[in-house]
Amino acid sequence: MVDRRTDMLPSLLTENLCSLVSGVDRCAFSVIWEIDSQTYETVDVKFSKSLIRSRWSGNYYKAQEMIDDKDDNTEMT
């Protein structure tokens, strides 16, 4: 089964609406925690609608290559 992929959601969602595609705005919901630097206790929490515009459409293999390459100092890495 390692050579197969089984989507748990319809392809319209997984391949289009929910995918982070470079240069395309996606709606998101953000949670922002403010943490005390001494006690690490939560000081404040904010919930907000937001937009994500991904700068790169990649895959897990390429991301791992970038992580493993100690000489890769590109902005995306």
Image (cartoon, rainbow, N blue to C red):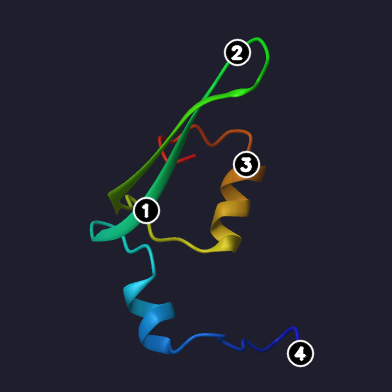
Q: Residues within 10 Å of mark 2 (few under 14, many from 20)?
A: few
Q: CA distance from mark 4 to mark 3?
A: 29 Å
Q: CA distance from mark 2 to mark 4?
A: 45 Å
CA gap, disc 3 and disc 1: 33 Å
Q: Amino acid at mark 2?
A: Ser
Q: Secondary structure at mark 4?
A: loop
Position above or below: 61 against 10: above
Spatial CA span between label 2 and label 1? 25 Å
Q: Are marks 4 and 1 in contact (CB under 8 Å)?
A: no
Q: Nearer the viewer, residue 68 or 4?
A: 4
User: Counting other residues with Cα less than 10 Å from the Cα at mark 1, is it few (<14), some (14-19), or many (20 or more)?
Assistant: few
Q: Secondary structure at mark 2?
A: loop
Reading the image, the residue beneath label 3 is 69
Amino acid at pointer 4: Met
Residue in view at x 23 percent, y 61 percent: 24
Which one is closest to the eye, mark 2 or mark 4?
2
Q: Is the N terminus in the top left, top right, bottom left or bottom right quadrant?
A: bottom right
Q: Earlier in the sequence, mark 3 or mark 1?
A: 1
- Dot placed on the residue nearer the N-terminal end, 4 or 3: 4
Residue at x 29% of width, y 50% of height: 49
Residue marked by disc 1: 29
- Mark 3 and mark 2 residues within 8 Å of each other at the beta carbon: no
C-alpha gap between disc 3 and disc 2: 32 Å
